[in-house]
Amino acid sequence: MVWENQTFNSIFILLGIFNHSPTHTFLFSLVLGIFSVAFMENIAMVLLIYIDKQLHTPMYFLLSQLSLMDLMLICTTLPKMAFSYLSGKKSISLPGCGTQIFFYVSLLGAECFLLAVMAYDRYVAICHPLQYTILMNPKLCVFMTVASWTLGSLDGILVLAAVLSFSYCGSLEIHHFFCDVAALLPLSCTETSAFERLLFICCVVMLILPVSVIILSYSRVLRTVIHMGSGESCRKAFTTCSSHLSVVGLYYGAAMFMYMRPASKHTPDQDKMVSAFYTILTPMLNPLIYSLRNKEVFRALQKVLKKRKLI
């Protein structure tokens, strides 16, 4: 009963990232605008890829999954932050906090593996084009996508189980705009060093292994592109891969900076800024990077808009 009361009756206070000064009010409005753009972009990408049959290929299926993950990621953190700021009600229960942690960790992990699958897809498409339909057949593509979601969810369950097993006491103020594990651990009365080591190992698996696959895939792609005889083929391959590498650099760079440093190196303000980058900006930039530099997506969008005008 004591454990149950400590766990499920704990009420935390999210201190947030903004106050009500004119400067912060402007920044909050800016973040809300970015959220709206990211929300609409990712919904548009998912629907566009679903509607246009010419985009029913492994590459675009994976891209639709990335947009879906980004959409869920921003909806996990931003609405609660906006509600807390506008209403002044900054409290969140531990079950609510656990829900945020589960979805946040699961989606981050799933994106890590999905980006590695996307790198493998580009490797097969460019280095083994004649075998592409065999090596990236629909069943395998779906299997790797489901595996990405599953591995991310397992990581989320593991972290959530640990967070709910801790007891919390003293000041329950979370120096963040959402329930992040790194911000929650200092509030625990329980010894968390073993969990922190486990969390680091999980980060190595979720970040280093996919990055290794990405580096290996693109090193092979780069070598193939350099030896391409056709300038047009080389340009198209480079454009497609550079879009993916831009997303990878933005995502993994921020995630590694956030989760692969010792806990003693973390500061609340720094963590909030880095988290804001890859939970707010990255979901907005991903569709822009892919759609603006991709003729097929742009063509599909034009076709849909023309149909709407005719109707």
Image: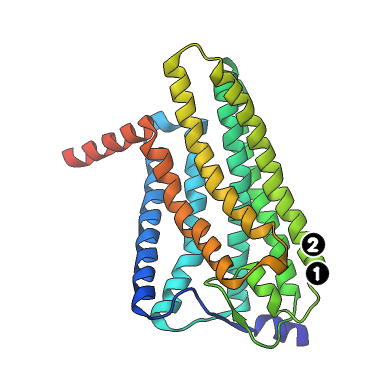
**Disc 1 crowd, CA 10 A, few/some/many (<14, 14-19, 20+):** few
Label ID, residue 197: 2
Depth check: give the residue in front, 286 or 20: 20
Residue 83, quarter of picture: bottom left
Depth check: give the residue in front, 267 or 168: 267
- Residue type, numbered disc 2: Arg
Asked whether the viewer can see residue 62, the reply is no
Q: Which residue is mark 1?
A: 193
Q: Position of residue 99 (x, y in %)?
A: 59, 68
Asked whether the viewer can see residue 100, the reply is yes
- Residue type, numbered disc 1: Ser
Label ID, residue 73: none
Q: Residue at x 72, y 69 (%)?
A: 264
Q: Position of residue 44 (x, y in %)?
A: 37, 47
Q: Is 264 placed left or right of 112 in the picture? A: right
Q: CA distance from mark 1 to mark 2?
A: 6 Å
Q: Position of residue 301 (x, y in %)?
A: 31, 38
Q: Are marks 1 and 2 in contact (CB under 8 Å)?
A: yes
Q: Residue at x 22, y 36 (%)?
A: 306
Q: Please tell me whether mark 2 sits on a helix, a strand or a loop.
A: helix
